[in-house]
Structure formats: structure tokens, C-alpha cells
Image: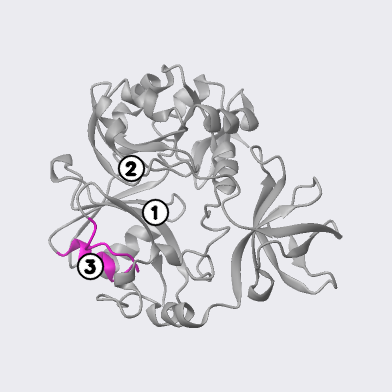
Amino acid sequence: MSNANTAALHKTPLHALHLQLGAKMVPFAGYDMPVSYPRGILGEHRHCRAAAVLFDVSHMGQIRLDGPEAARALESLVPVDVIGLTEGKQRYGFFTNSSGGLLDDLMITRPQAAAGLGDLLLIVNAAGKEADLAHLLTHIGHRCRVQALPERALLALQGPQAATALARLAPGVAELSFMTGGAFELAGIPCYLTRSGYTGEDGFEISVPAESAEALARALLSQPEVEPAGLGARDTLRLEAGLCLYGHDIHATTTPIEAGLGWAIQKVRRPGGARAGGYPGADVIAAQFATGTCNKRVGLVGLERVPVREDAEIVDSHGHRLGHVTSGTIGPSTGKPIAMAYLASNHCAVAHEVFALVRGKPLPMRVTALPFAPHRYKRS
């Protein structure tokens, strides 16, 4: 990449630190981001599974919503129980369009009032954050205050020893359970963190003032358990955890039911619930709850040691097309080729055998339950 093109990319507050740590930088969602460090993607992945790693996810968008109507207003755009979200709790959700497709997925948190982050804090994907902000302003900006928070950075500390490392800076974090959060001082820096992440491991996502992000990152990296990790390991970790990547496994023409995300629509928002419907595409999604879908997202494990990548066609034993792969790799933890794909619903039974076309050759794969690697969240 030319210097001119590199200069055109946005930089996170940790950019200089990434270079100092020897990161290999790549363009991602308009940002110059670390894909890996000298340890390499495989080493970073394994260190996350065994100890703890620190990701810079400051390219993602943080948006606050304020006002007595904020939760009810947001429910008009997402099929999630936002009104019932109590202080310090977090939920996964998604914006839908009129055909029930997914415009973006996001995390929704109701911070404690003392945190000073509004009535609701949203974390949205980097590539969609401008569109998401416009979507919110257009549709609910008259009902609540919608404010982007570019002055805040976001770090993710992930792995089974993440709590041990973080508790040295703030012992109270150990009391949090999965999908809960609170305001803490870390290395003297006021932060808001949630016990959540995108790896399937225990861990934390930390919203921190941008001017203090490097100091916090250095404090975390000084802990003996913690190593830096880049986008490459983040992708292999989330794939083993069976988690969707927007723009690949889910997109504007995929519904939550096709994607296997119906669990994120609470009963109160489902057909027959007290606040059913009232969001874009609700009728389409209600019908799919009742009758199912023609295609579903599934996990696939390869029976030969050849990686199967995104867009590979999936066929049956007669060569008839069944679907396509949306994400695929050799799982560093599983030691096998793994993939997520959309298949015709009548071919989605666990253990059913299908074939992926790789350079014209059919490779056998078996439908498997997700995730590929067990989740290890701290639930209580």
C-alpha cells in the first residue's frame, strides 16, 4: 500500500503503540489496523485460549441515547427487549429492515447513571457506524438524544486469565458476570466495562477516554498473562465460537431466523408477547418463527484437512447446489477445517454429509452443532 493510501486511513488512539509492538498493519473498515504481531495469528489465538490477549477495537462505533423515551424508541428499530434491560446489564441485538434483513448487529448496554454515558450505550460495527448513526437520527432522533462518542476508545481483554489480570487494576471487576457491566477506575483511568467479548472466552470490553487509551493498554499489557492480538486471531476465535461477522455471515438480506439468531429476540418481543412487533420487518420475522425458513446457518467440519473458504459452493452427493460458505478456516483449537454456511433447511441435520467445492473438487464436510469450541463465559 502506498504512503498516500495509508495516510487516508483513520487511525485509532493505539496506532503508535501497534507500530512499536511490531504489528503487521492492514486496512480494515477505513482504519489502519493490526492484523497480527510478531507472535503470529496462531500464537495469538492459542494465547487467548490459554491466558489473555488485548485487542484494539476502537474502530467500532460507540453511540449514546438519552431521554425517558430512549428505550421505547430503540425498540421501534430492534426486535430486542430494551425496556426490560436493567442498569448494568447488556444485550445483543440487531437493526432490521422492512424485509426482516439485518442492517447491522450491535451490543446494547444500560449503564449505571453515575457512569455518565447516557441512558443507553450502543456498540456498533466499524463499517456501519455512520449508517447506524444516520438510521438512529432519522428514525428516533426526535424521540431521544442520539450522540456519537468518537472521543472514546474501546479495548477488549479476552481469555480465561483476563479477570485475573484486570482484577489487579480493579478488584471489583471479578464480581461481574457475563453481559453485565459497571464503571471502574483502571490504572487511575475512569472506564466503563462489560464482561463480554467476541471470542467465546471469558473477558471484558472496556470503553475508555481516547486520550487515556494508550496508558490503559500499556497497563494491561504489563500484566504477565496478557499479550497483544490482532484482527487475524479475533476472526479465528470468533469463528470457532460460532459468532457471526457482519457482511459475511449476516447481511441486509439475511433474517435473524435464517441466521440462527432467534434466541436474541426475547419472548416479550415475539409473536404473542406483550410488546410483539413494532419494528421493521416484524411480520416477516413472525412468519418465519411460525413456519421456519428455506435456508439456515449451520456449522460444517471438513473430513479432509483442506481449508474451505468464504463463498465456496456447497453441493450434495449428486452435485446439486445446497448453499454456500460464509466463513471458513482451519480451526487453531479444533485442528480441523471448520466453516459456517447457509444450507437448504432439509440438509441441516447434525451429522448430515455435504460437499464443498474447492478448485472444482468436492470435499466432504459434516454438519455440526455450533459452536466449534465451547463457550467459557462466566455466567454467575
- Residue 127 x, y percent position in the rendering: 47, 52
Judging depth in this view, the residue of 73 and 50 nearest the camera is 50
What amino acid is labelled 3 in the image? Ala
In the picture provided, is 322 more to the left or to the right than 284?
right
Q: Secondary structure at mark 3?
A: helix
Q: CA distance from mark 3 to mark 2?
A: 31 Å
The quarter of the displayed image where residue 359 is located = bottom right
Q: Which residues are magenta?
A: 69-85
Residue 374, can we see it? yes
Q: Is residue 67 left or right of residue 334?
A: left
Name the residue rendered at 58%, 44% in the picture: 373
Q: Position of residue 330 (x, y in %)?
A: 70, 43
Q: How is the image coloured?
A: one colour
Callout 2, which amino acid? Ser
| Residue identifier under label 2 | 380
* Mark nearer the viewer, 3 or 2: 2
- Residue linked to disc 1: 129
Q: Which residue is mark 3?
A: 73
Whichever of callouts 3 and 2 sits on the residue coming sooner in the sequence is 3
Number of residues whose C-alpha sits closer than 10 Å to that of mark 3, classed few (under 14), some (14–19) or many (20 or more): many
The reply, left or right, for residue 8 in relation to residue 142 is right
Label 2 secondary element: loop
Q: How many residues crowd around disc 1 within 10 Å: few (fewer than 14), some, or many (20 or more)?
A: many
Q: Position of residue 8 (x, y in %)?
A: 50, 41
Residue at 56 percent across and 28 percent down: it is 47
The residue type indicated by label 1 comes to Lys
Q: Is residue 324 magenta?
A: no
Q: Quadrant of the C terminus?
A: top left
Q: In front: 239, or 367?
A: 367
Magenta-drawn stretch, dominant element (helix, strand or loop): loop
| Badge nearest the viewer, 3 or 1 | 3
